[in-house]
């Protein structure tokens, strides 16, 4: 599913150049549930952005679903994000002026192949337990509910891979665990590859594979069983 | 590729969110467009009055060149010979490219005195008569009854019965109308007929011909009415002059008015050849091609009258030739060829029209430039607003990129917002421009008194003004939003999402 080889990412230039990722090489198979753990500034969000094609200023090679990310044009990369990838962020990143349904269907505004976006959004909102919040706006929801809308949005195009950046970082422990259970369920029942970036050990432990980053270097790659 | 209808939905929601910002930033566009449309319409309105009513810019009046020799001024060649304005010159002018017609004009070359007006002002009004003749077809398109402006004596009128003949004529055996004989009524010492005229209908009994004659049809120039209504009528109101009784005159009110003239005699003297003769004239309409002050009749009458009172040569040369251009754009080139290649001159009005047109164009251009500067400043304001809005929406744009928006989609979305603002601003600007014009027109009508050529409206509206207003509003908003749109589309989505 994902092949990362010798990826290095610098920020800045000259004497103020900071290395966020240093020669990272790893491989993630289809249907895996992986957590990327590390302290703040260890490069885990950078790695996630590289995998999701949101960051293009890196060196090395990244293949997602067999496609070399570096070789893709902006249009092709956007199409990949539009149809095959889903993102979940710590601060939910919902558009406040849109309803839950509109937030979920956001990718359809930019060319998603989903035939009936509204029906698909309603189905996904029901699946994450928000069937009664279809027309609500994000400001009317709790933190946990907002993150469920964000998950529904990530699921909307029927992705093979969901990339989550600190998905429980803005939630209390109980709500955070409910969200993680949702990811576990999606991984188990639908075979979606899930990569969760976190600095919290209890979150990392939910995944069957844990990759630890320190100063941009993979220092540990632990698998359960 | 993003669906345009779906993007339009997003655009609508974005505009709704930032209504205050956009209303404020589009204020300049509204002011600029309304100023633009106002001044362009005003310029067009003034141009129409000046160049189409005061000076008829699509026509050139060709005359013989004149030379100043000390205090004297002479027409034609300085040492005799040279060009004449005759039928040969008419043919040469007709052959010039861009000429749609050449119409000779011939003036009365003898003294004449007109009288009439008893029916209107209650007493007979006497005046020197100034008149010229032009081809009937030049004037007929301007008349409600063009068939009345004809030379009744030019050629025999075919008929099958009396009904097919004009008043005072009967259908003769040869199948042409023949003038009926009549006994002219006696005249007073000033030549005015006394008693009933024996001829039927419009015709009158000719003192010298003893036949029923049709009155000579004449047309007046609407400018004469403008001058009368705008100055004379206003000045005479309340005076003890007979003219004080005159109402404001309209072309329709004067059609049918008839007067008499003694040809060959005036207050200034008598013609050396030919006996004085009295003729009746009838106003059949008004045309801007008629002589500015005086009466214009079919040229055949003038040719015959000139032949009666002057040498033959006078009846074969014209005092000017009216050259009509196919399009206004050809006039300048025609003027050059007529003066430089043919050695003829143009009536002074052409130069005045050129100067007036230039002044109007310069003034209109200055105001249009001012409005364009306002719109440019507004475009800069639009740019600032969009830059601010885009900074505010940075994270949101990052999310859109994350869910699959291409750079082009982001650019299109921002430019669509600018298009809507430009279209709305342009439409409101056009509306305000028209409203301002209506207000100015109302104030103009109420506060400014009558004057010659006072138009009903100072403004002339053409569809392209509105298209330009709307298009200009959109264009300048797009120009203003272009840099912000490019900046938004080039935004690094990862940095936008993390807030860096």
Image: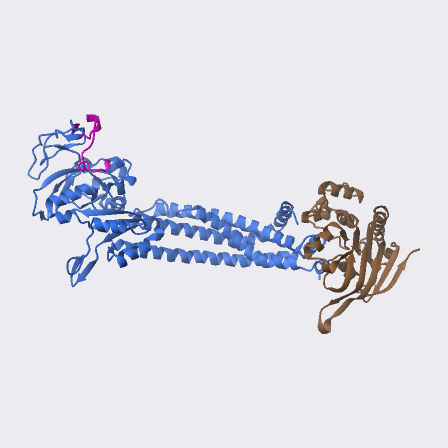
Magenta stretch containing residue B165, yes or no? yes
Residue B268 drawn at (x, y percent): 10, 49
Q: Quadrant of the C terminus of chain A?
A: bottom right
Where B186 falls versus A87 (above or below)?
Answer: above
Q: Is residue A199 visible?
A: no
Could you tell me which residue is drawn at 17 percent across and 41 percent down? B301
Q: Is residue B445 left or right of residue A219?
A: left
Q: Colour in which chain A is shown? A: brown
Tell me residue B131's x, y (percent): 18, 45
Magenta stretch: residue B1 in it? no
The tint of chain B in the picture is blue
Which portion, as a residue range, is magenta? Answer: B148-171
How would you classify the magenta stretch by its main secondary structure? loop
- State the image quarter where residue B203 is shown: top left
Is B188 rendered above or below residue A172? above
> In front here: B21 or B310?
B310
Residue drawn at x 25%, y 51% as measured from the top left: B92
User: Looking at the picture, how far across and down is residue B80, in whole percent?
Assistant: 15, 58
Q: Position of residue A46 (x, y in %)?
A: 77, 62
């Amino acid at each position: 599913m994902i092949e990362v080889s010798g990826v290095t990412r610098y920020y800045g230039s000259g004497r103020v150049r900071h290395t966020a990722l240093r020669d990272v090489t790893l491989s993630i198979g289809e249907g895996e549930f992986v957590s990327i753990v590390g302290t703040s500034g260890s490069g885990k969000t950078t790695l996630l952005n590289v995998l999701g094609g949101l960051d293009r200023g890196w060196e090395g090679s990244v293949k997602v679903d067999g496609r070399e990310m570096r070789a893709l044009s902006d249009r092709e990369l956007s199409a990949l994000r539009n149809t095959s990838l889903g993102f979940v962020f710590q601060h939910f990143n919902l558009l406040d002026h849109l309803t839950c349904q509109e937030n979920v269907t956001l990718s359809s505004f930019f060319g998603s192949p989903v035939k009936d976006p509204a029906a698909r959004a309603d189905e996904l909102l029901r699946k994450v337990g928000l069937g009664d919040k279809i027309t609500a706006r994000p400001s009317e929801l709790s933190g946990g509910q907002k993150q469920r809308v964000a998950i529904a949005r990530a699921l909307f195009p029927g992705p093979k891979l969901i990339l989550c950046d600190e998905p429980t970082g803005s939630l209390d422990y109980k709500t955070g665990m409910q969200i993680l259970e949702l990811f576990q369920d999606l991984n188990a029942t639908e075979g979606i590859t899930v990569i969760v970036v976190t600095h919290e050990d209890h979150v990392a432990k939910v995944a069957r594979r844990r990759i630890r980053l320190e100063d941009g270097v993979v220092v540990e790659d632990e698998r359960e069983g | 590729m993003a669906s345009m209808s779906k993007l339009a939905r997003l655009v609508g929601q974005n505009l709704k969110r930032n209504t205050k910002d956009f209303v404020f930033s589009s204020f300049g566009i509204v002011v600029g467009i309304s100023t633009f449309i106002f001044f362009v319409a005003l310029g067009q309105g003034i141009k129409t009055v000046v160049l189409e009513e005061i000076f008829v810019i699509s026509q050139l009046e060709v005359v013989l060149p004149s030379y100043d020799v000390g205090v004297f001024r002479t027409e034609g060649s300085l040492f005799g010979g040279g060009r004449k304005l005759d039928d040969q010159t008419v043919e040469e002018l007709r052959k010039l490219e861009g000429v749609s017609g050449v119409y000779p004009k011939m003036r009365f070359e003898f003294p004449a005195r007109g009288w009439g007006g008893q029916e209107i002002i209650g007493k007979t009004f006497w005046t020197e008569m100034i008149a010229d003749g032009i081809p009937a077809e030049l004037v007929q398109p301007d008349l409600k009854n063009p068939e009345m402006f004809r030379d009744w004596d030019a050629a025999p009128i075919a008929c099958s019965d009396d009904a097919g003949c004009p008043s005072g004529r009967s259908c003769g055996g040869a199948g042409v109308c023949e003038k009926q004989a009549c006994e002219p009524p006696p005249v007073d010492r000033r030549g005015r007929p006394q008693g009933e005229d024996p001829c039927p209908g419009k015709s009158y009994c000719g003192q010298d011909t003893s036949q029923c004659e049709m009155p000579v049809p004449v047309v007046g120039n609407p400018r004469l009415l403008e001058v009368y209504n705008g100055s004379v009528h206003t000045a005479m109101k309340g005076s003890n002059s007979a003219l004080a009784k005159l109402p404001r005159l309209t072309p329709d009110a004067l059609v049918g008015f008839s007067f008499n003239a003694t040809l060959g005699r005036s207050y200034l003297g008598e013609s050396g050849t030919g006996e004085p003769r009295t003729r009746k004239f009838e106003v059949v309409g008004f045309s801007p091609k008629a002589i500015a002050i005086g009466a214009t009749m079919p040229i055949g009458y003038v040719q015959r009258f000139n032949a009666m009172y002057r040498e033959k040569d006078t009846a074969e040369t014209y005092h000017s030739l009216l050259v009509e251009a196919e399009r206004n754009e050809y006039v300048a080139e025609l003027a050059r060829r007529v003066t430089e290649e043919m050695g003829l001159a143009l009536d002074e009005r052409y130069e005045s029209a050129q100067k007036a047109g230039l002044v109007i164009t310069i003034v209109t251009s200055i105001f249009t430039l001012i409005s364009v500067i306002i719109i440019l400043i507004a475009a800069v304001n639009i740019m600032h607003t969009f830059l601010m809005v885009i900074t505010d929406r940075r994270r949101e744009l990052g999310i859109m990129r994350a869910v699959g928006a291409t750079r082009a989609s982001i650019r299109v979305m921002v430019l669509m917002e600018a298009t809507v603002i430009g279209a709305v601003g342009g439409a409101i600007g056009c509306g305000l421009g028209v409203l301002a014009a209506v207000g100015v027109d109302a104030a103009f009508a109420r506060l400014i008194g009558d004057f010659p050529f006072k138009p009903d409206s100072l403004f002339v509206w053409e569809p392209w003004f509105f298209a330009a207003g709307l298009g200009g509003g959109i264009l300048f908003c797009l120009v203003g939003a272009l840099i912000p749109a490019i900046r938004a589309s080039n935004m690094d989505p990862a940095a936008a999402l993390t807030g860096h």
